[in-house]
Amino acid sequence: MAASRRPTLADVAREVGVSAKTVSRVLNEDGPASARTREQVLAAVARLGFQPNLMARNIRVGGPDTTIGLVIPDLANPFFGAVARAIEDTVGERGLTLLMGSSADDAGRERALTDKFLARRVSILMIVPSVGADHSHLKSHRAAGLPVVFLDRPGVGLSTDSIVSSNRAGAHDGVAHLVAHGHRRIGFIGDLPVKLYTRRERLAGYRTALQEAGLSYDRSLVANAHDQQGAATATAGLLGLADPPTALFAGNNMVALGLVAELARSNRKDIAVVAFDDVPLAEALEPALTVVAQDPEEIGRAAAATALSRLDGDRSRARTITVPTRLIVRGSAERPAPALQEA
């Protein structure tokens, strides 16, 4: 079979050594087939990267909606919830149904979920990549015409479309804002693991802003946390240094929640704060939280539009779409540094 040709039902049947009708029965679940035959057919489908034309089948037999598989790291994170909602709203206009699962940022779990979605013959696959995941196993599916889109972070081992935020520029803007208010000791609390793409990019933006201001990068001012409790502990650690920071930059929304909680518990109203990504009730805090806001709705819409374009036959080169962030000034970052307050 030529590498450039999309595999057909007949190719799967020939691979397994059964009739095309048997393959159709297995895929459509509309007739008897032994467990062994079903296993062999599904294995051949995955091996060849066969994708049935479900849109055509739905029209022909009035079957269920075509499905889209979405893998995200955390169902409880409001950022990914907003992304998923925007995808669902966009694809729903085409009569497609979104299936979603959480990888818990685990590469093995992510692979298991993608395999399940592929076995269900999804028409589009969207993934927020986990650290350590290798996506080369999707090459045959991608080559066969399956739209694959990475969200929030680029994937590894597969050239395909990616939709990301302007992480580096956004972090730079947030830290530069603190510098503009006189802060020279600025702490950074980022995500774990440290190899996470978004964490690396935001730390790079932090470092660039310091460099532009003529400030040295101090490793002792950089801490990491994976959840709210970890962020609270990291915050306490930074503020307990012999030469503590006067301002803190939170690398994501979950870190921001733990950071703000620790400042409230310790009654530290003197610390300026900027958070990357908005958080619920940010405006209700005292002072209200200044943030570098992502646009999860636009990320979701862009991902859906890109995937639908591929589904409709767009075979242009893979592209990366970067969705801008914006600094929202609310009060928490605008406290001047102590030296300026005394002046």
Image (cartoon, rainbow, N blue to C red):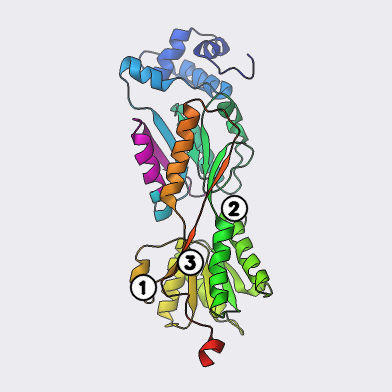
Q: At 42% from the left edge and 75% from the top edge, which residue is drawn?
A: 331
Report the front residue among 206 and 259.
206
User: Which disc number belongs to residue 197?
Assistant: 2
Which quadrant of the view contains residue 222?
Answer: bottom right
Magenta region, residue range? 83-105
Say above or below: 29 vs 287. Answer: above
Residue 106 x %, y %: 53, 47
**On the rendered image, what quadrant is the N terminus found in?**
top right
**Which residue has dot 3 on it?**
275
Residue type at mark 3: give it: Ala
- Find residue 260 and report its image quarter: bottom left
**Residue 80 shows in this picture:** no
Q: Nearer the viewer, residue 161 or 70?
A: 161
Q: CA distance from mark 1 to mark 2?
A: 29 Å
Against 103, residue 121 (above or below) is: above
Q: Which residue is denoted by mark 1 in the rendering?
A: 285
Q: Identify the amino acid type marked 2.
A: Tyr
